[in-house]
Amino acid sequence: MEFLNFLLILWAAWLIWRRPERERLAFRLLVISCVLMAVLFLIGTHGSLVPGVNL
């Protein structure tokens, strides 16, 4: 899943670089990437009282 997230970000960067007129699609890809990161974090920490981060 993290690789999919990396590919979404890479695709958005390529769109901005090569086809600036597709900026709206690139922004949507970045939003999808952020939502995917948040969902993966929530799934990974589901059921734990404190998330698995350094306190």
Image: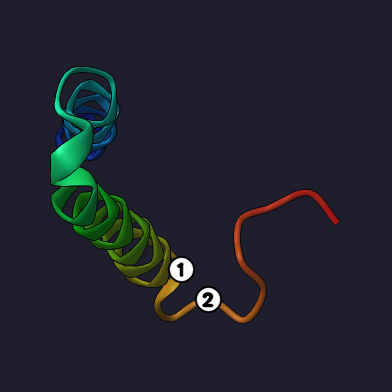
Front in this rendered view, residue 50 or 5: 5
Q: Nearer the viewer, mark 2 or mark 1?
A: 1
| Placement of 26 over or under 44, stated as above or below | above
Q: x, y (%) of residue 52?
A: 61, 56
Q: Quadrant of residue 31?
A: bottom left
Q: Secondary structure at mark 1?
A: helix
Closest to the observer: 29 or 24? 24
Q: Residue furthest front?
A: 21
Q: Amino acid at mark 2?
A: Ser
Q: CA distance from mark 2 to mark 1?
A: 6 Å
Say which amino acid is labelled 1. Answer: Thr
Instruction: Give the residue at x 86% y 57%.
Output: 55
Residue 13, quarter of picture: top left
Question: Does the residue at mark 2 contact the one at mark 1 (Cβ under 8 Å)?
Answer: yes
Residue 15: x, y in percent?
17, 29
* Residue 50 x, y percent position in the rendering: 67, 73
In terms of image quadrants, where is residue 19?
Answer: top left
Q: Which residue is mark 2?
A: 48
Residue drawn at (31%, 66%) of the image: 35
Q: Which residue is mark 1?
A: 45
Residue 4, given in percent of the width and then of the height, sits at 14, 36
- 12 left or right of 50? left
- In this view, the residue farthest toward the right is 55
Establish if 14 lies above or below 53: above
